[in-house]
Image (cartoon, grey):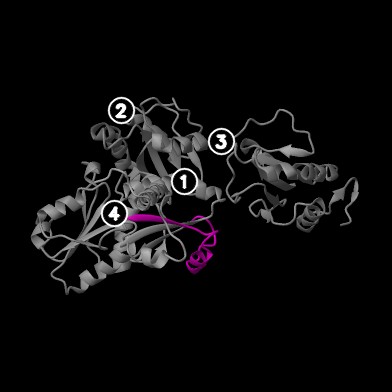
């Protein structure tokens, strides 16, 4: 046999190698186009698709985490992407008008929007819940133990048989709530005997790693079973006295006033050490939890950037001791300055001061300027109350960012505006760096610059300016909103 390859065979091998190289370079995210979307999507039981545009900054930020998640979910959930600049037909069909839009597909059918975290860990955690049945059937004790031995809480229903009306309602609830919670069911009552089950029941098993002498690890649902009543039961009991706060559940936990202890929590490598401090928090929580405050523990490293941004925490602050914060539903923030003592007495003193109203709120603020006589007054969080909420003054305030090009473009216009109204003692033109100061409640600042008019005597009713950023248009807006006639360059403004 000749060792020399024929030209045709050589060309074939080159094509195969090139195709393989192209496929491997794509990673584990499947790229879908208009012509192939339907038949390729139908091949996958569960698929997460990101509809993106190559120029989109948020899409670029998501891409590496999406790729990492695709690799970790390989063989379980397929992750795919659609370039909407080249495949407009598919993107329009699925309503992807903003980027990135993420959707879950089951066997090629649109199953709804993905509203989970957009980190690799968050995507993996969320999408694993999307696989398999809405409720897992359990056949023996081994199945039950394997299902409840989980990082997250488990809801298990015990029913008389497949025709049980309560089972039908349970399965409806599972189909609706599966994205948030884990469900399983069984027809074998004996599996529930250790927990007092002798008739149709639903049990909530809290995660084993969070087992504590301060609360029951298993809670029994005793209400009439409906989707609504089961949802309320899960909501009220799933987290227990002191849950583990994570990036995935923080939005659900922070709907209440929440005290959080941040420390080197690690339930994978150091479960005993993690529960050492949690038990001390729980001891105090058992005394104060009925007073309208919820409690949680969290890994400080997971929330370090947030703690630095919201509470001014340095990387070395606190050492190995828990860093304690309270964050209320109204956005008020408090920190415990005293070191956390092992007997929990320091935490008790902190809570007594909190409930008595003796604590000073933590406010992220730049220093108050020593001189502030320019036409545009500089406002910081610590001076917001004195300047912007002065009951005698109308105030126009711009929330800006130093790096924002739109803010820089507005700066000369805003300064000119302030100079024209400088003689009017009834109005203040002000600005605040929104990246270096806490934004007060009542002000929705999602981008920069954001401008609000705050009228005298109505400080709880700021009006957002949505018009053109030309001087004449801003002046007309101020004239319309002002509580007194404007004085423009020393005379009444005629606008």
* Separation of residues labelled 1 and 4 (CA atoms): 39 Å
Q: Which residue is mark 2?
A: 342
Q: Is residue 129 above or below residue 303?
A: below
Q: Nearer the viewer, mark 3 or mark 4?
A: 4
* Separation of residues labelled 2 and 3 (CA atoms): 29 Å
Q: Which residue is mark 1?
A: 328
Q: Is residue 313 above or below residue 495?
A: above
Do residues under tags 2 and 3 come within 8 Å of each other at their CB atoms?
Answer: no
Q: Which residue is mark 4?
A: 76
Q: Which residue is mark 3?
A: 364
Q: Is residue 261 above or below residue 315?
A: below
* Separation of residues labelled 1 and 3 (CA atoms): 15 Å
Per the image, label 1 sits on a secondary structure element best described as loop
Image quarter hosting the C terminus: bottom right
The stretch of residues the image draws in magenta is 76-101
Earlier-in-chain disc, 4 versus 2 = 4
Q: Nearer the viewer, mark 1 or mark 4?
A: 4
Earlier-in-chain disc, 2 versus 3 = 2
Earlier-in-chain disc, 3 versus 4 = 4
Do residues under tags 3 and 4 come within 8 Å of each other at their CB atoms?
Answer: no
Quick check: can you spot residue 282? yes
Q: Nearer the viewer, residue 174 or 126?
A: 126
Q: Nearer the viewer, mark 1 or mark 3?
A: 3
Residue shown at the point (29%, 39%) measured from the top left: 282
Residue shown at the point (27%, 49%) measured from the top left: 152
Position of 346 compared to 380: left or right? left
Tag 1: Cα neighbours inside 10 Å, few (<14), some, or many (≥20)? some
Earlier-in-chain disc, 1 versus 2 = 1
Quick check: can you spot residue 293? no
Per the image, label 3 sits on a secondary structure element best described as loop
């Amino acid at each position: 046999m000749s060792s020399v390859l024929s030209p045709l065979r050589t060309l074939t091998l080159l094509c195969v190698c090139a195709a393989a190289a192209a496929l491997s370079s794509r990673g584990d995210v499947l790229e879908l186009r208009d012509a192939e979307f339907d038949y390729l999507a139908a091949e996958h039981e569960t698929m997460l698709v990101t509809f993106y545009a190559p120029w989109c900054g948020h899409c670029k930020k998501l891409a590496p985490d999406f790729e990492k998640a695709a690799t970790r979910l390989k063989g379980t959930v397929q992750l795919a992407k659609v370039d909407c600049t080249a495949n407009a037909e598919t993107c329009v069909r699925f309503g992807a008008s903003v980027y990135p839009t993420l959707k879950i597909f089951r066997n090629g059918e649109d199953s709804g929007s993905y509203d989970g975290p957009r980190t690799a860990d968050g995507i993996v955690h969320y999408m694993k819940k999307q696989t398999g049945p809405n409720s897992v059937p359990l056949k023996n004790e081994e199945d039950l133990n394997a299902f409840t031995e989980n990082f997250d809480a488990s809801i298990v229903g015990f029913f008389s048989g497949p025709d049980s009306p309560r089972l039908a309602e349970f399965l409806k609830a599972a189909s609706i709530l599966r994205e948030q919670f884990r469900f399983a069911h069984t027809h074998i009552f004996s599996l529930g005997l250790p927990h007092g089950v002798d008739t149709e029941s639903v049990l909530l098993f809290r995660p084993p790693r969070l087992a504590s002498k301060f609360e029951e690890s298993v809670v029994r649902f005793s209400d009439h079973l409906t989707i609504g009543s089961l949802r309320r039961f899960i909501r009220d009991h799933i987290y227990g006295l002191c849950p583990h706060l994570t990036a995935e559940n923080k939005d659900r936990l922070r709907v209440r006033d929440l005290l959080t202890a941040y420390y080197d929590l690690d339930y994978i490598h150091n479960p005993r050490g993690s529960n050492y401090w949690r038990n001390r928090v729980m001891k105090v929580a058992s005394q104060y939890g009925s007073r309208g405050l919820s409690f949680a523990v969290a890994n400080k490293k997971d929330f370090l950037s947030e703690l630095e941004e919201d509470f001014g925490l340095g990387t070395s602050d606190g050492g190995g001791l828990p860093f304690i914060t309270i964050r209320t539903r109204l956005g008020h923030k408090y920190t415990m300055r005293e070191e956390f003592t092992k007997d929990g007495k320091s935490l008790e003193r902190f809570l007594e001061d909190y409930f008595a109203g003796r604590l000073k709120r933590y406010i992220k603020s730049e220093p108050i300027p020593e001189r502030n006589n320019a036409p545009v007054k500089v406002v910081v969080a610590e001076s917001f109350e004195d300047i912007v909420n002065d009951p005698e003054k109308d105030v126009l305030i711009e929330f800006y960012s130093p790096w924002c090009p739109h803010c820089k473009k507005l700066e000369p216009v805003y300064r000119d505006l302030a100079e024209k109204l400088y003689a009017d003692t009834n109005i203040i033109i002000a600005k605040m760096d929104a990246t270096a100061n806490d934004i007060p409640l009542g002000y929705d600042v999602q981008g920069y610059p954001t401008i609000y008019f705050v009228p005298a005597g109505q400080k709880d009713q700021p009006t957002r300016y949505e018009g053109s950023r030309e001087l004449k248009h801003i002046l007309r807006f101020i004239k319309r909103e002002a509580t007194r006639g404007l004085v423009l360059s020393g005379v009444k403004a005629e606008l």
